[in-house]
Image (cartoon, helix red, strand yellow):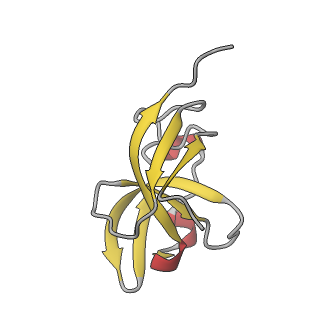
Amino acid sequence: MHWPVLRVKVAERSMEPALHPGDWLLVLRTRRIRPGHIVLARHPGRPGMLIVKRAAHPVAGGWWLLSDNPAAGAVDSRRFGAVPVALIEGRVLARYWRPRS
């Protein structure tokens, strides 16, 4: 059974200024996304790796996903092409910060 909402931690700078390393995200498991949504997806070449990107536009059978900060050396659809719909895990609902211990 999969929970309808999951949480993930941002690890890199590819989505700055919207998201920063250390931010936590609540993600709704859905494939119903629109251009502009920030999504969680599986990397097409490395399905074990999760990526957080902005949905730019739909393409045949998938989505074109882009980084907000390509200067950070981000890997997105400009490098690996469209992401099949089956690899979209969900869309980001909210960002939060964990309390410091």
* Residue 62, x across and y down, in percent: 42, 78
Q: How many marks?
A: 0
Vertical placement of residue 60 versus 43, above or below:
below
- Which residue shows up at 51% across the image and 78% down it? 86
- Which residue shows up at 54% across the image and 32% down it? 23
Vertical placement of residue 33 versus 67, above or below:
below
Q: Quadrant of the C terminus?
A: top right
Q: Quadrant of the N terminus?
A: bottom right
Image-quadrant location for residue 66: bottom left
Q: Residue furthest bottom?
A: 60
Horizontal relation, residue 73 to residue 49: left or right: left
Horizontal relation, residue 61 to residue 40: left or right: left
* Residue 93, x across and y down, in percent: 37, 46
Vertical placement of residue 87 versus 54, above or below:
below
- Which residue shows up at 56% across the image and 37% down it? 13
Image-quadrant location for residue 12: top right
* Residue 64, x across and y down, in percent: 41, 69
Image-quadrant location for residue 95: top left
Front residue of 28/12: it is: 28
Q: Residue furthest front?
A: 1
* Residue 53, x across and y down, in percent: 47, 54
- Which residue shows up at 68% across the image and 70% down it? 47
Q: Residue furthest top?
A: 101
Front residue of 83/80: it is: 83
